């Protein structure tokens, strides 16, 4: 193979695909990136057998060919080259890279040994704006579990319900649901949280739309010249809607930044108690107060002004509440609960952005 590409395009493509290549694997080929010519373009691909990333870039192809080379070395090497044209030449299992006065040869492995790139048959296709997809991923993936003993909780459920498409995730202690758009199709797919994070990472800034394609066992995210393909998680996601209260007895409207600030302060004193903080609402003083105790260090009580309709208390994990509040971009949020044992519901006060809700289960105080 002989091809010429620009350093800028090759560097961007390598940064997209390289992170999927695994350095901790019993198959050395999975630590490599595939270089393969396709007409007048160069295909780069990497896979860990769960996720596959591919990107094609424009190239001047003199001779067709393919090879796999170590992902970390080639990525770091190209990143340090000056901007301009790079000549790539494959001879046997060696890739020679020439850029101005720089010439290096990297030992690779035959492309025949590289796993076949997955193909997704387009049974169902949805198109999302890239900005919406990024936001929805950030708002839901945070509540997915990291415990591999319950695989179904390590993913984000993409499904339709009553004519709308939703993302939902839960780790058993908290839950997030985001409505994306209206959909006539019946979709139900459990996408690994790691895949969702990878998709959010590689969406180009100049990409307006993302195609999401399902075939029952796999999902493909297509973003211009970038594709991320992943296996779906098998199993039944819990009926999470049973965990969402239809209404709450105690309701408060509070400035998000104020509540976030006092939650973080309370969290400093809650480290000894596993992050346990107690919220108290008072309609008399029109406040939400948070109390936390550190037996060796002291205790803290902070409060924020709020519109409160009833008095009550609930004990929560400070980190869960902090992360939930960070998922909202609005200035004010609704905070509702129904006593010490019922789930807390955090949602937007703006009807235009009310497509998201975050549920936090209380701690037994």
Image (cartoon, grey):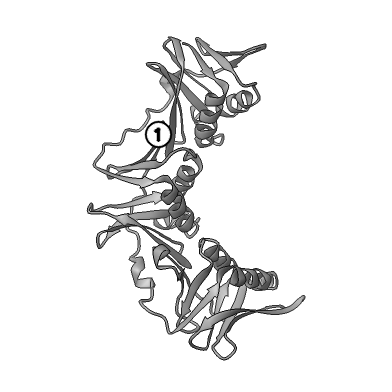
Disc 1: which residue: 224
Q: What residue sits 38% from the left and 42% below the top?
A: 209
Asked whether residue 197 appears in the rendered view, the answer is yes
Q: What residue sits 49% from the left and 32% below the top?
A: 17
Residue lying furthest bottom: 284
Question: Neighbour class for label 1 at 10 Å: few (<14), some, many (≥20)?
Answer: some
Where does residue 9 sit, x and y in percent of width and height?
52, 25
The answer to which quarter of the image holds residue 41 is top left
The answer to whether residue 65 is above or below residue 364 is above
The image quadrant where one finds the C terminus is bottom right
The answer to which quarter of the image holds residue 264 is bottom right
* Secondary structure type for disc 1: loop
Where does residue 57 sit, x and y in percent of width and height?
45, 24
Asked whether residue 21 appears in the rendered view, the answer is no
Q: What residue sits 49% from the left and 75% below the top?
A: 335
Where does residue 54 sit, x and y in percent of width and height?
43, 31
Residue toward you, 87 or 143:
87
Q: Is residue 76 left or right of residue 161?
A: right
The answer to whether residue 232 is above or below residue 341 is above
Residue toward you, 300 or 51:
300
Q: What residue sits 52% from the left and 65% below the top?
A: 324
Where does residue 242 sit, x and y in percent of width and height?
34, 72
Residue toward you, 72 or 93:
72
């Amino acid at each position: 193979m002989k091809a010429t590409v620009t350093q800028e395009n090759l560097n961007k493509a390598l940064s997209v695909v390289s992170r999927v290549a695994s350095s901790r694997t019993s198959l050395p080929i999975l630590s490599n990136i595939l270089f393969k010519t396709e007409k007048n373009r160069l295909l780069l691909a990497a896979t860990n057998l769960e996720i596959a990333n591919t990107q094609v870039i424009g190239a001047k192809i003199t001779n067709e060919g393919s090879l796999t080379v170590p992902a970390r070395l080639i990525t770091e090497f190209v990143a340090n080259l000056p901007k301009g044209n790079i000549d790539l030449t494959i001879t046997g299992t060696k890739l020679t890279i020439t850029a101005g006065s720089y010439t290096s040869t990297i030992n690779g492995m035959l492309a025949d040994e590289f796993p076949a790139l997955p193909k997704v048959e387009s049974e169902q296709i949805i198109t999302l704006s890239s900005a919406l997809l990024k936001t929805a991923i950030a708002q839901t993936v945070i509540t997915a579990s990291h415990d591999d003993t319950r695989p179904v909780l390590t993913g984000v459920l993409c499904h339709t319900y009553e004519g709308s498409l939703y993302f939902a995730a839960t780790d058993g202690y908290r839950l997030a649901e985001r409505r994306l758009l209206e959909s006539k199709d019946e979709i139900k797919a459990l996408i690994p949280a790691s895949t969702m994070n990878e998709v959010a990472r590689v969406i180009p800034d100049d990409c307006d739309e993302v195609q999401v394609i399902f075939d029952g066992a796999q999902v493909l995210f297509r973003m211009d010249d970038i594709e991320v393909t992943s296996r779906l998680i098998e199993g039944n996601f819990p009926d999470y809607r049973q965990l969402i209260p239809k209404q709450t007895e105690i309701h408060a409207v509070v400035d998000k930044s104020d509540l976030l600030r006092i939650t973080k302060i309370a969290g400093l004193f809650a480290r000894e108690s596993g992050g346990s903080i107690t919220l108290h609402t008072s309609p008399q003083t029109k406040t939400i107060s948070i109390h936390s105790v550190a037996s060796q260090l002291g205790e803290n009580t902070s409060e924020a002004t709020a519109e409160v309709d009833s008095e009550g208390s609930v004990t929560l994990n400070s980190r869960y509440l902090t992360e939930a509040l960070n998922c909202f971009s609005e200035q004010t949020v609704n905070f509702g609960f129904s006593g010490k044992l019922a789930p807390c519901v955090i949602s937007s006060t703006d009807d235009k952005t009310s497509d998201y809700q975050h549920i936090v289960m209380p701690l037994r105080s």
